[in-house]
Image (cartoon, rainbow, N blue to C red):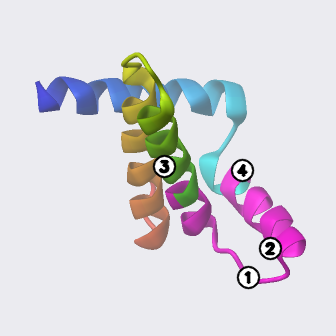
Amino acid sequence: MPSRILEKAIAVIEKRAETHGDYRENFQHTAEMWSAYLQMEIAPAQVAVMMALLKFSRDQCNNEYNPDHLLDAVGYTALAGAMAAKTKI
């Protein structure tokens, strides 16, 4: 079962690349915007972690189980790890 979740997360990441563009560029742009708004430095990997936390929050606040929240959190966590390690997924 965990391997199926990871496979689905990989598929989501790949599909998002088609619709949202390169994740590194997207998170860099978001980090710059958040940094300006918060008046403190935010790294692209931190954006991915914060997005995963948002998904965890949605999972906690949702009355019905929605597998997308945790699936997306897995994807964001993988992207955060790739950026922190400066690797390409």
Task: Name the amino acid type tagged 3.
Answer: Ala
Reading the chain from its start, which is encountered first: label 3 or label 1? 1
- Disc on res. 52: 3
Residues 55 and 64: in front is 64
Mark 2 and mark 4 in contact (Cβ < 8 Å)?
A: no
Secondary structure type for disc 3: helix
- Res. 85 image quadrant: bottom left
Residue at mark 4: 26
Where in the figure is residue 9, as x and y percent of width and height? 36, 31
By secondary structure, the bulk of the magenta-drawn segment is best described as helix
Q: Please, what is the three-letter code of the amino acid marked with disc 2?
A: Ser
Q: What's the distance in space between the residues labelled 4 and 1, CA to CA? A: 16 Å
Residue 31 on the magenta span:
yes
Q: How much space separates mark 2 and mark 3, taking CA atoms?
A: 18 Å
Residue range (magenta): 26-49
Q: Which residue is mark 2?
A: 35
Mark 1 is on which residue type? Glu
Say which quadrant the N terminus sits in.
top left
